Image (tube, rainbow, N blue to C red):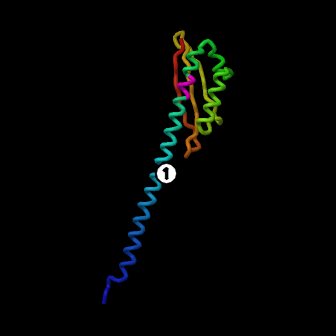
Amino acid sequence: MNKNKGFLIFEALIALLIFSIGIISIIDYQKKSVTGYSNSQNRLIAISYANKLSNIILLDSNNLNSYINKTADKYMDWENELNSALPYAKEKTPSISIVNVDGKDVVSIIIYWKNTASDKFSSYSITIGVI
C-alpha cells in the first residue's frame, strides 16, 4: 500500500499558501512604493512653491505687510497656482509671518498639504531674511 498518497494534496495547498503570502507581500510593497512616491512629489511641489513665493517677496520687499495680510495680487495668483498643484492645500492656507531680528526682517513661509494615504497635514517651511 502507498502511504504517501494523501500528502500530495496537502503539500500542494501549503505551496499555494506560501505563494499567496508572497504575492500579497509584493502587492503591499508596491502600494507603499507608490504612496511614498506621491508624498515625495507633493513635498517637491511645496518646496518649489515656497521658493517661488520667497523670491516674489524678496523682489517686492517694500510691500511685506500685503503678503502677511495675503492681499497682494502676486500672492493671490501664487496661492491659486498652489491650490491647483497640491492636494487639499485649500483646506489649510499657507502661513506667512515676519519677525524682526537685530533690526532685520525675517520672513517665515509654511505650506501645508495632505498626503494621499493620510488625513494628517504635512508641511514645509522656509525662512528668508529681507534686506
> Which residue is at the far top?
103
- Position of residue 61 in the picture relative to residue 18 (left or right): right
> Which residue is at the far bottom?
1
Viewer-closest of 48 and 122: 48
> Which residue is at the far right?
71
**Does the magenta portion include 10?**
no
Please report the residue visible at 66 percent of the width from the left and 23 percent of the height from the top.
70
Q: In which quarter of the image is residue 66?
A: top right
Identity, as a three-letter code, of the amino acid under mark 1: Lys
The relative height of residue 1 versus residue 8 in the rendered view (above or below) is: below
Residue 50, image x, y percentages: 55, 27
The kind of secondary structure the magenta stretch mainly shows is helix
Q: Name the residue under label 1.
A: 31
The relative height of residue 63 versus residue 8 in the rendered view (above or below) is: above
Residue 107, image x, y percentages: 56, 19
Residue 95, image x, y percentages: 61, 27
Magenta residue span: 49-53
Please report the residue visible at 62 percent of the width from the left and 27 percent of the height from the top.
78
Q: In which quarter of the image is the N terminus?
A: bottom left
SS of the residue at dot 1? Answer: helix
The relative height of residue 109 versus residue 60 in the rendered view (above or below) is: below
Label total for image: 1
Q: Quadrant of residue 91?
A: top right
The relative height of residue 1 versus residue 51 in the rendered view (above or below) is: below
